[in-house]
Image (spheres, rainbow, N blue to C red):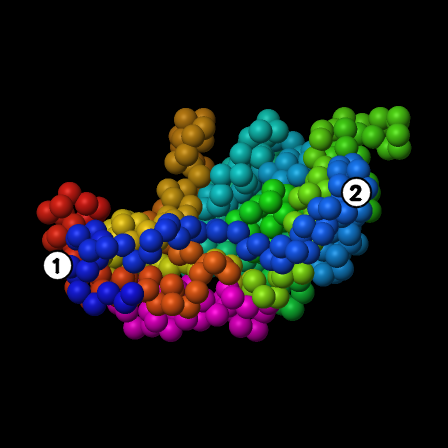
Amino acid sequence: MIKTRLDELAVFGGPPSFAHALHVGRPNLGDRAKLFARLNDALDRGWLSNHGPCEQEFEGRLAAMLGVKHCLAICNATVALEIAMRAMGLTGEVIVPDFTAAATPHSVQWLGLTPVFCDIDPLTHNIDPRCAEALITPRTSAILPVHLWGRPCDIEALSEIAHRHRLKLLFDSSHALLCSYRGQKVGGFGHAEIFSFHATKVCNSLEGGAITTNDDALADRIDRMRTFGFRGADNVECEGTNGKLDEFSAAMGLTSLDGLPDFIEANRRNWRRAAHDLKGVPGVEVIAYDENESNNYHYLVLEIEASRAGVSRDALVHILTKENVLARRHFYPGCHRWEPYRTLYPHPRAPLTGTEEVAARVMQLPNGTAVSEVAIDTMTSVIQLAVENAPETMRRLTAAGGTGS
């Protein structure tokens, strides 16, 4: 239902636009018949883990899609980050963007390394290479950038900096499956890249991740480390952990790969619909994707400039939540303001103004195959209505004790 009057908004007493909560990151499920057939095959084989046929096929298909020599499936992307960094022999400090998911710095801290928070470019939301270079010290061993929203960061500049300072370069590509940089698929850049196949990602394996690399020696170390350091049945050659991807997760991953073209098309359709609906709404902008590059369009992200919209980002999140649209403030308020970092590192080495600026205005809307164009129109109409009547919207929110900041 398209709402045209403030009284119709749920926050002001009207019925919610959606009977059930519409979540950011609701899973793309794919063909259930194919999934159940794969699960039954795995059960019939009695091979449920330890690099079974589904996992091997998943790795092979991913490597071919991304154009890389090695793809090693891991139980989840956080463990993948940890294994990759351990295999690369990182020490001391690792430079990470401040505007990212907690998993990125947590994986560094978990290994006993020091995450050094770097500011982002407020236009791209990605790590600022100049800031990264300014943070390099004799203790720095690596730079760990993130391709946020699937929009690749400045790989060329970061590669040049890493090469010149003899640093490792490891990309967190959790958002960037099938995204491209200058025509080349993300996956083969730096020393290695990490992908996530968590249930909320465009392609999911329930839980899962992968490490891609063109480095034969690094791939060999990762392969042993993800299996307790084993090479062969009873020969342990190095320290390791249990990072394997089980067969049921791999079966879901294969089913997601089958459906990926449809998932991406649904994302693209919704992104274009939202961009059309919100075009010209003051202070509201749908982040753009480069149509000359490949992208999965999975992240439907808005930037709210409160001074122009007349309504704050937090107020819009509050209004949408009452409509059963569970919009998210990613990645508010920036990693340096989360624990344990605000206690361990209370004085960041460099200003993080880009992070703070973007964290105050970014809002993510639901997308994916669970979201129809009608749902997009309904969500955008709520935003339009609130902005078009901004003074009265904020007056009523403040009077009701709602989010009027």
The answer to which of marks 1 and 2 sits earlier in the sequence is: 2
Which residue is rendered at x = 72% and y = 61% of the image? 65
Image coords of residue 165 (percent x, y): 65, 45
Judged left or right of residue 302, residue 135 is: right
Please say whether residue 226 is visible from this viewpoint. yes
Q: Please state the horizontal and vertical placement of residue 271, each as a whole percent of the image.
A: 45, 66
How many labels were placed on the picture? 2
Kindly identify which residue carries mark 2: 44
Residue 155 is one of the magenta-drawn residues:
no
User: Which stretch did the figure color magenta?
Assistant: 265-294
Closer to the camera: disc 1 or disc 2?
A: 2
Side of 272 where 167 appears, left or right: right
Was residue 283 drawn as part of the magenta stretch in this picture?
A: yes
- In the image: residue 274, left or right of residue 208: left
Q: Secondary structure at mark 2?
A: helix
Which of the pair 129/89 is nearer the observer? 89
Residue displayed at 63% across by 47% down: 205
At x 50%, y 64%, the residue is 267
Residue type at mark 2: give it: Asp
Which of the numbered marks, if any, corresponds to residue 392? 1
